[in-house]
Image (tube, rainbow, N blue to C red):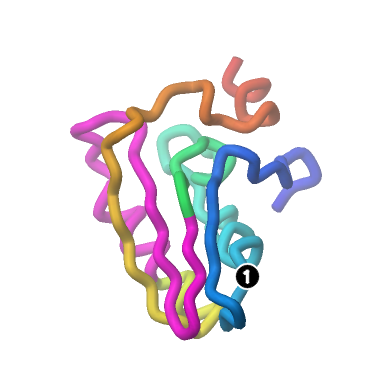
Amino acid sequence: MTNNESKDFSTVTGSRDQNPKVSIEDVLEVLKSIPDPELGINIVDLGLIYEVESHQDEVVVKYNLTTLGCGIGPMLEFQMEQMIEEELEVKVILERVFEPAWDKSRMSEWAQSVLG
């Protein structure tokens, strides 16, 4: 993470079991290492991550893409699953959500300032 990236996770909701293996913040930090290849900003600051649930041995990540027909979806899914499983050693369940639709208001202040 560069010094300019946000540590604000306010657009992401989360829930966890009583003694999860990893924290929601741990998951978000891993996801911040994944940039949108077209925009060059990580998927957390872009507001693509809607919710993270942390359970005993798995995490559920609910996410959306910037547009309905976004062609990078499969690549981002592969990266999210691989990075979380490798770095946090938990099973990952990815759920793409369509409501609410993504818009620029979901981006962090930092991402909004970079993209203008």
Q: Is residue 61 magenta?
A: yes
Question: Disc 1 designates what residue?
Answer: 23
Q: Is residue 24 above or below residue 71?
A: below
- Left or right: residue 71 versus residue 107 is left
Circle 1 Cα neighbour tier, 10 Å, few/some/many (<14 / 14–19 / ≥20)? many
The answer to which image quadrant residue 88 occupies is: bottom right
**Residue 22 screen position, x and y as percent:** 60, 76
Q: Of residues 85 and 114, which is closer to you in this image?
A: 85
Query: Is 76 rendered above or below residue 53?
Result: above
Residue, x 63% and y 70% (percent of image)? 23
Which residue sits at x=69%, y=30%? 110
Quarter of the image that includes the C terminus: top right
Residue at the left extreme? 69
Indicate the position of residue 46 as horizontal and vertical percent values.
Answer: 52, 36
Does residue 105 appear left or right of residue 112 in this picture? left
Left or right: 18 with respect to 6? left
Q: Amino acid at mark 1?
A: Ser
Which residues make up the magenta segment? 52-81
Secondary structure category for the residue under label 1: loop
At x 55%, y 45%, the residue is 12
